[in-house]
Image (spheres, rainbow, N blue to C red):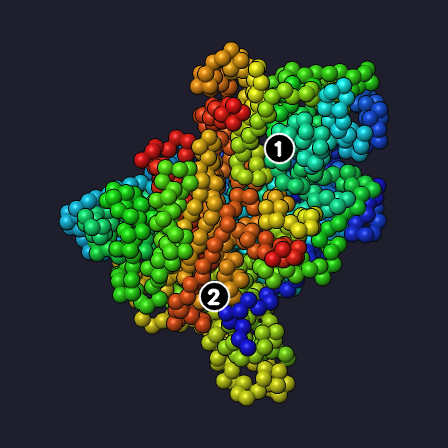
Amino acid sequence: MRFNLNGADVDVGMHPMSRLLDVLREEHNLTGTKEGCGEGECGACTVLVDGEPVCSCLIPVSQVDGAEVVTIEGLGGNHPLQQLFMNEVGAQCGICTPGMIMAALALPDDPTLDDVKTALAGNLCRCTGYSAIYRAVLKWKGQE
Amino acid sequence: MTAVGTSVARKDGIGKATGGARYADDLVFPGMIHGRTIRSTIPRGRIKSIRYDFDTSGFTIVDYRDVPAKNAVDLMSQDQPFLAEHEVRHMAEPIVLLAHEDKETLHAAKVVIEYQEEDPLFDPEKSTLSFKDIAIEKGNVETGLRSADVIVEGVYRTGHQEHVYIEPNGVIAVPEEGGIAIHGSVQCPFYVIKALRCLLGSAHPNVRVIQTETGGGFGGKEEYPSMIAGHAVLLALKSGRPVKIIYDRAEDMVATTKRHPSIVRHRTGLTKSGKLVAMDIDVLMDGGAYVTLSPTVLSRGCIHAAGPYSCDNVTIRGRTVFTNTPPNGAFRGFGAPQTEFAVEVHMDRIAEQLGMDPVELRRINALKPGDRTATGQTLRDDTSAHMVLEEAVKRTDFQRKRKEYKGTNRSIGLSLFYHGAGFTGAGERNLKSRARLDLTPTGVRIAVGSTEIGQGTRTMHAQIVTDALGIPYESVEVAQPDTSRVADSGPTVASRTCMVVGKILEECAIEMKSKLGELSPAEYYARHGELSVERMYEPPDWIQWDDAAYRGDAYATYGWGCDVAELELDPDTYEVKPIKLTAVQEFGRPIHPALARGQIEGGTAQGLGYAILEKVVMKNGAMANGQLTNYVIPTTLDMPELDVVMMENPYPGGPFGAKGLGELPMDGPAPAVVNALRAMGLDVREIPATPELLSTAPTI
Amino acid sequence: MEGAGVRIAVSELDMRVASSVDEALRILRDEKRTPIAGATDVYVALNFGTLTPRRFLDIWTLDELRTIFVHQDKLVIGALASYTTLMQSHLVAERVPMLAEASRLVGGVQIQNRGTLGGNIANGSPAADGVPVLSATDATVVMRSLDGERRVPINSFYTGYRSTVMKPDELIVAIEIPPVEGKQWFRKVGTRAAQAISKIVMAAVRAPSPKIALGSVAPTVVRAKMTEQALAGGASIEEASRILGEEIVPIDDVRSTADYRRRVSMNLLRRFWADTA
């Protein structure tokens, strides 16, 4: 089986019931996707599968056969939202940041603050109280 | 162009936002194997036998007999073993370590331990073994109580709280030429060094600790990483290979430290007009099965127990006791959130009994410059209790809303609080913290052991050095903490990293500036080569502290805060819906306003979780809800609007007037929320104020 | 409680991927396998030892089970319809808005994207957010095996805590919801505002014969039949709420208490009655 990872097709060598998270981190050395809980609760492992945010700690890699997977590394290093997370201090310790950014990417245009909160309700942050994250995301969307 | 006071670009770089920042679990070393901790499954007893029910070939197995020198985590006391020998004192106590190169094989290994079980002690009120007793006396509390018109009594309880740093604990021990290197998610690299020296003795002198990027700490990575590092080192020494130990969330929650639960009793005398004349306070904290940091947590808790109020007659007695539960430890606020919760709810109860407005009661009694605290400290001009109170009351239109909300399911409450910055009493003097600045070909490098764990250490230190040295911010680098290369600036705790370590760096920079003369760092380096300046912290000379009598200047300065919580209560489900939290806080001066705001917003969120959501359910001495599914911290939808006001009242002894900030925001939210519930008629004296608790709370 | 990642041996797990419903049914007849839909619960349950099977059948790719349509005036929801799909479906919004509401309150976006209604039913948790809605609307679970299709009312589907009438060779393919007569009312009381497991969940329909279903107050999602009868018979809401308190059998667990669940269930019944008056 194979899938498209950040724009390139890759073969899966690991067991089909390996978690997508482990395949990303161990087989592809993409360690930007983090494990915070292993139970789909914290969202630190969020990646996009066919454009939708999912928890990579919950998904057997067999379920992304033929799919497009985008991780934080797939954004390169110049995405405006990445810079805004740093400038607005939406990232403190940074462990939730990649997952937070991946979840925010799925937001529609012109989101309200409530839209942002709803989109990020599956991502836990223990450092910021979320306010700075809203500032970063709303600025990116031109709403602030 | 000055850096201090502006939100300059952070020294973290972009790595945290690109996934490039490397945390412990992201590191792989050649030949690395994985470690696993076999833990007790009973709360108290003796180990009868240990059987390895698996093919042990390819495994490294370590028990207490593999300890080279002393089987004790050297912290305040040496009572806690790295690996239990014969006696088990709590659930999830480490007994045996396994390592293997294949994680699956490692997890499949079955170790069977037989115990002689003994009756566990879980109730701190029944414990007769105290780790530390504290008595603070000011005036004569009995005389004061006799003179009082009114006496108000109350008992207040707070539960455990779990840190929930989103990155669980993790450490890697890597054998290297002539020694061993520890890479890990740690707050205090030199604490780990101290613990490992005790564990290893003189046979292994070359141990160094390198802090990896750390995904949050909040006190939870202050002392426990020493334990994990010891385990990784023991496995690495025996196997000769790098050993990685990463806890999963369940192990992290069940085995590692939590905030101390507390029971605080108040007996308070007042005049009819609301002046405090006597405060008799008793503080009990559940220390868990080993001493760890409990004596100092108790100490800070007791010193803050009378709240930010002036009273001539005060007695504070405290004790922290043994129970058969995993040891409790450092957590943002360090004892003060517990005791300030108690005194602030008590103040609203007093106001109620006097028929007085709670703001007015605080106005009458709040500390002013020149007032003396319970330890006899005379406060200086940087005392801001009244300033934050008045600002918060005005900004939130508190009095009007308080009246307007009466009889509805909406309510508003406030808390007034303070937090001592830096180590208690003579702590900073005894610590002898050091900081160093090294010249580089392009500027200077900061070389301190203070860790960046999200709060902004790197950036804020660089700003201080930038302005003190008068060079561009971009030319200041910050070294990754590696104990073999940086100065021991003391632990990253106690809201001291800006105020204390920042101050030493400021002094280093001033000294370096005079050595450079007219030359820029680059010019000096090109002409004369390397130059380093290292200095030791000198606390203000006026600080006097008698540790035996618990009298004197407990802290060089204090941060001050007033939180206002506006909330609604669902009449059907008893769920609290916070509408708005206003946090007015004075902490000298913000070095980096955006980072400072982040500390207040984040601390306020943790305080809100502590107030209404975060309940550690203990069953048979262990956390029964050790999953993020069942121990719930606030999500985006649990957080109300946060209104943060940063007020200034510079502390002359801090860099550019800065005080400590990190812990202050943790002290206020819980009492503000509970006081709002009280204003609604619910008699709550305990946190977390869960819907279950509120559904049966008596009405006032 | 040891080591990051999964605690079970992944290499001992066995997964087959079904490329069609027919193939899935053949596999289920020939081999004992547990179907996996969006997998939101698989590793959690494996880690905590609540899922003992080691052989699985991945049905996630079976798009034919994702459709939502109306047939003979019943709303037919494919078993693999995700919560996100349910939230976005006009048919669901028109006919069973409380199912869209329940879907919005399941986990965060990540879970809504993977969690399915069929998975929610098969998983059998008494705290399932979607199931009380199905119970209150007298929905039918459509199961298929090589022997054909079988329809079982959701209210006869569960036989006890996490146990169902499903046979090992059967697959849930759809849920049929008849037209709902009367005002729909839904309330989830979770452990927090989002990403929460239900402490109590109530779905109800206000009609001459009211329908009231609850989750997390018994070993399975339940219909409060005695309460319904009382209300249908003209009992006061106070009387009905007293009956509800006696009818349900909540327990203490790490998330809540039996007392709270009982008291709040009674409050919610009153609120339902007032809101739909």
Nearer to us in this view, B354 or C116: B354
Residue type marked 2: Pro
Q: Which mark is residue B590?
A: 2
Expressed as whole percent of the image width and height from the top left, the position of residue B106 reads: 67, 41
Mark 2 to mark 1 CA distance (whole Å): 44 Å
Determine the chain carrying the residue at label 2. B
Nearer to us in this view, B183 or B48: B183
Expressed as whole percent of the image width and height from the top left, the position of residue C157 reads: 66, 17
Q: Which mark is residue C101?
A: 1
Decide if residue C161 is in sight here: no
Expressed as whole percent of the image width and height from the top left, the position of residue B131 reads: 36, 48
Decide if residue A74 is in sight here: yes
Determine the chain carrying the residue at label 1. C
Q: Answer above or below: position of C151 versus A102.
A: above
Q: Name which residue lies at 59% across and 56% down.
A: A135
Q: Answer above or below: position of C38 versus B451.
A: above
Q: Name which residue lies at 29% across and 59% down.
A: B367
Expressed as whole percent of the image width and height from the top left, the position of residue B243 reads: 64, 52
SS type, badge 1: helix
Q: Residues within 10 Å of mark 2 (few under 14, many from 20)?
A: many
Q: Name which residue lies at 50% across and 59% down.
A: B597
Q: In the image, which is nearer the foreground, mark 2 or mark 1?
A: 1
* Image quadrant in which you'd find residue A80: bottom right
* Image quadrant in which you'd find residue C21: top right
Residue C272 lies left or right of residue B415; in this view the side is: right
